[in-house]
Image (tube, rainbow, N blue to C red):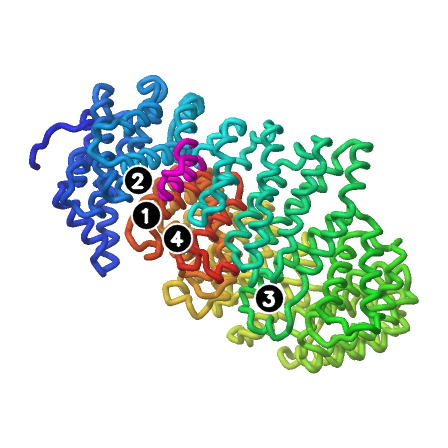
Amino acid sequence: MERREEQPGTAGAGAAPALDFTVENVEKALHQLYYDPNIENKNLAQKWLMQAQVSPQAWHFSWQLLQPDKVPEIQYFGASALHIKISRYWSDIPTDQYESLKAQLFTQITHFASGSKIVLTRLCVALASLALSMMPDAWPCAVADMVRLFQAEDSPVDGQGRCLALLELLTVLPEEFQTSRLPQYRKGLVRASLAVECGAVFPLLEQLLQQPSSPSCVRQKVLKCFSSWVQLEVPLQDCEALIQAAFAALQDSELFDSSVEAIVNAISQPDAQRYVNTLLKLIPLVLGLQDQLRQAVQNGDMETSHGICRIAVALGENHSRALLDQVEHWQSFLALVNMIMFCTGIPGHYPVNETTSSLTLTFWYTLQDDILSFEAEKQAVYQQVYRPVYFQLVDVLLHKAQFPSDEEYGFWSSDEKEQFRIYRVDISDTLMYVYEMLGAELLSNLYDKLGRLLTSSEEPYSWQHTEALLYGFQSIAETIDVNYSDVVPGLIGLIPRISISNVQLADTVMFTIGALSEWLADHPVMINSVLPLVLHALGNPELSVSSVSTLKKICRECKYDLPPYAANIVAVSQDVLMKQIHKTSQCMWLMQALGFLLSALQVEEILKNLHSLISPYIQQLEKLAEEIVVVVLQQVFQLIQKVLSKWLNDAQVVEAVCAIFEKSVKTLLDDFAPMVPQLCEMLGRMYSTIPQASALDLTRQLVHIFAHEPAHFPPIEALFLLVTSVTLTLFQQGPRDHPDIVDSFMQLLAQALKRKPDLFLCERLDVKAVFQCAVLALKFPEAPTVKASCGFFTELLPRCGEVEPVGKVVQEDGRMLLVAVLEAIGGQASRSLMDCFADILFALNKHCFRLLSMWIKEALQPPGFPSARLSPEQKDTFSQQILRERVNKRRVKEMVKEFTLLCRGLHGTDYTADY
């Protein structure tokens, strides 16, 4: 190999075999990685380049790849290799070479200050890593030195170029600290050193942000730099001037997003609540944004309204207790609360016309908890102030929960409808929580509104308004004991007056009746007011879930008062069962309802009704077997084995058998234990003959209930290994035609990890193949399958340390998982699934941080991955954000949602409303 001048780090760099890592070969491999259409060649090149980056020869070729005549992709690789060598192999660098390495990096950064920005960023990250390794002893005033060097007038680079390069360096320094591999004791020393060095950074940032001559690109960089430094938990009072400057910058549309991020990060620091005086100064600044907020809402500018709402909620949610403690400032805090109320009630339907209101819901929980935590006297004062606010909140939430017009709703996508459903559940949870503050008066308030709506002759009422008020009642009645409420009789009397012309309204009427079933048990005289509605709804397949579940609740709670209605209930039920109006699961619920009903009748009545109900099913069974003896479950087992011996190849029969035993296992629980070995053996035969999701679901039940019992572990382990082997074979043959099987298989694997991780210790289990199949399942078009696969990985990754085969496969193939997740976020998966992929990223970060910090930077290196719309800076920002957040899962989900919009080119467009 050609001999070159000795570079820092070659001494003691290890004796790895030289794989001819020359400049020429590296350039060839990079060309192959970027431009070769063959995916195998790309993967080989990627693997070779990863070896090159960590080789001793990297010290030689890195500097040469940075030459001005190279293209940016090649220069970028050189800069990345330097960063990897410095950050991972610091101990290989002799101390007498620190200064020359530092000087070379400064020189390169100066060169690239007017060159490629992606290369500049990587060089800054490399110098930041070097600074962190040298601080505080070997480089005591690192930050001050950086500022001084870049402010020198004798540089060949123009002032703006030097300024932007310095800001880039100062921005990546705290980010690199957050993801660095420093030992814990060194982290504390370096953090303290950086806290002191703020004194060299913040005055410069203030000057650049406030001076009128600073161009927009510099001011934007200043805000990002400030946002980066506040995450080092800088005292809030030290940030005052910059926060105020960031508020002023909110008026500039180019600086708006960066200003919001900086303000939110500064306010959200856990330590910020200690600086009450500074927090009080922030309230007028936030309130001063109200005109801008209203203007944005009026103009349909969702980005601006969303950003301002984030700021208001960050201050209120993080510091409500500290601000409530300042009783003399109660009016200014109340004004902030009212501003957040405006954000909760922002016009438009979520998630199509607005995405802001959902940000505020947690704030109302926090505020209520803080008020109710005060001592009696102070609590009474705040109750007087805030009870009217919370009554207003109920009105706002019920308005936001209203469905759009039928015509408009018809144009919504299935994703939008699902997000709206989840949003309504969040509203329901909030209303239930608010009941603690408002008590019985809340129910009276809702009843009065509904009564006026239904009895008014002045104007026709909309079904949406009626539905929302009922939804409010249902939300509270489902979890709160309303048996002593004096408004429920009136509500029961109003329900028959509702003109039901819509499926959504009919559903809510059913669920409301179901939520009041315990009250009906105490007031049986009112059953006749609502039971006809429920029985009528049973005949409508669109109301299947709501009508059947409501009848089941009534039959369970009121069974001793139902004999007068029994004949009618049985007749209607039998009719809908024979007409096959409902799906299998609803039919089972209906049978359970009838079981509750019949159990309260006289024996002869039970037998008469049972005969009419069961006869058709007995006749069907008689066709399958020559004789039937149903005495105890084990005799049924013999019968089913006989049926199966003739019908093992019939998928419908197998599914029905699985349904019988799944119900038996769920009902009998531990009492089913004697039959576990027999059932495991039968399940194995069934699944080997015809793989079906129902068999996997039943296996999952067995794992859940019995796998932890030593006596039952052997047959369950044998079954688990068998179904896994059969399913892996299915994957080899092509699993795309069986998304339901893949879905159930992923759920089974997740349950095994949750309930009995020892199942993954068996030598006969091919954990690597399971892992690779699960990665493949992430790419399925069916959302439930993808969700189940994500669920598997969120159970698997926390087991890296305790289950050796799991740790090994994650070490070897985890990067493949990360690439699949990034591809999905980049646009290959539905946006409705982004929370699931965010869960995987969060689990990787929490349990495999060292590996993720290496993988994510490498995976995001290739241009165009995971989306051609992304700049290298955006990819860098995303990876830094993800690696920094190891505690707050909600923040990771927000980051992923933002990033996927960027990947899809939807950020800042009307389509952002999907979030």
Q: Position of residue 526 (x, y in %)?
A: 89, 67
Q: Position of residue 652 (x, y in %)?
A: 57, 75
Compared across the picture, whether 618 is left or right of 57 comes to right
Near-viewer residue (772 or 644):
772
From the viewer's perspective, is residue 874 above or below residue 403? above
3 or 1: tag closer to the N-terminus: 3
Per the model, the C-alpha gap separating discs 2 and 1 is 9 Å
From the viewer's perspective, is residue 657 above or below residue 202? below
Q: Position of residue 69 (x, y in %)?
A: 14, 44
Can residue 172 be seen in the rendering of this structure? Answer: yes
- Secondary structure state at the residue bearing disc 1: helix
Amino acid type shown at disc 4: Leu
- Disc ID at residue 872: 1
1 or 4: tag closer to the N-terminus: 4
Per the model, the C-alpha gap separating discs 4 and 2 is 22 Å
Q: Which residue is mark 4?
A: 822
Looking at the image, how many numbered discs can be counted on the residues? Answer: 4
Can residue 590 be seen in the rendering of this structure? Answer: no
Closer to the eye: label 3 or 1: 1
4 or 2: tag closer to the N-terminus: 2
Q: Which residue is mark 3?
A: 658
Badge 4 crowding class, 10 Å Cα cut-off, few under 14, some 14 to 19, many 20 or more, is many
- Secondary structure state at the residue bearing disc 3: helix
Q: Start and end of the magenta stretch?
A: 206-227
Q: Which residue is mark 2?
A: 121
Badge 3 crowding class, 10 Å Cα cut-off, few under 14, some 14 to 19, many 20 or more, is many
